[in-house]
Image: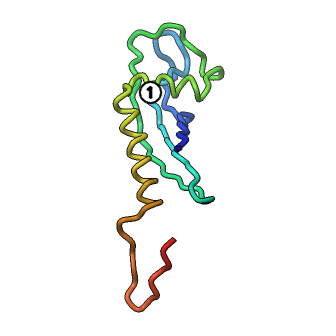
Amino acid sequence: MITYNWNCKTVDAYVEEAGNDDVVYNVHWIVTGTTTEGGKEYSATNIGTQVLNIDDITNFIPFDQLTNDEVVAWTQATMGAEQVATIEANIADAINLEINPVSITLTIGEPVPPAE
């Protein structure tokens, strides 16, 4: 089972917007998936940015009261379930390729590494 960690702690914010200070409008997200198989931990990461719609701010949360969970919820809601699922599927594919590689890099004149 892969556990996904969404880090949405880095944001761009307008100093002032619609009477509010430090209004988050762009999220720099990092999603890391991890799993353990055969006693070994595997992980993969995907990064990107997501612009938020701030046209109609309701229930404004001051920046010093924001949590990662809140910004993750905003980011995922803006992306939509399909894009969130695609990001997590890409991470799962990368982890599966790490566990079960279909390609390796070899150097002529060097010994072939043992299969795990």
Locate residue 62: give its quadrant: top right
Residue 100 percent across, percent down from the top left:
43, 61
> What's the residue type where badge 1 is placed?
Gln
Residue 25 percent across, percent down from the top left:
44, 25
Locate residue 39: give its quadrant: bottom right
Residue farthest to the right, as pictured: 64
Image point 51% across, 45% down: which residue? 33
For the image shown, how many numbered marks are present on the structure? 1
Q: How is the image coloured?
A: rainbow
Residue 114 percent across, percent down from the top left:
50, 79
Image point 51% across, 32% down: which residue? 11
Indicate whether 16 appears above or below 79.
Answer: above
Mark 1 Cα-neighbour bin, 10 Å: few <14, some 14–19, many ≥20: some
Residue farthest to the front, as pictured: 38
Indicate whether 10 appears above or below 64.
Answer: below
Q: Which residue occupies the foreground of this view, 9 or 62?
A: 9
Residue 37 percent across, percent down from the top left:
56, 55
Q: Could you say whether the residue bearing mark 1 is in a helix, strand or loop?
A: helix
Residue highlighted by disc 1: 76
Image point 48% across, 51% down: which residue? 44
Q: Which residue occupies the foreground of this view, 97 or 110?
A: 97
Residue farthest to the bottom, as pictured: 109
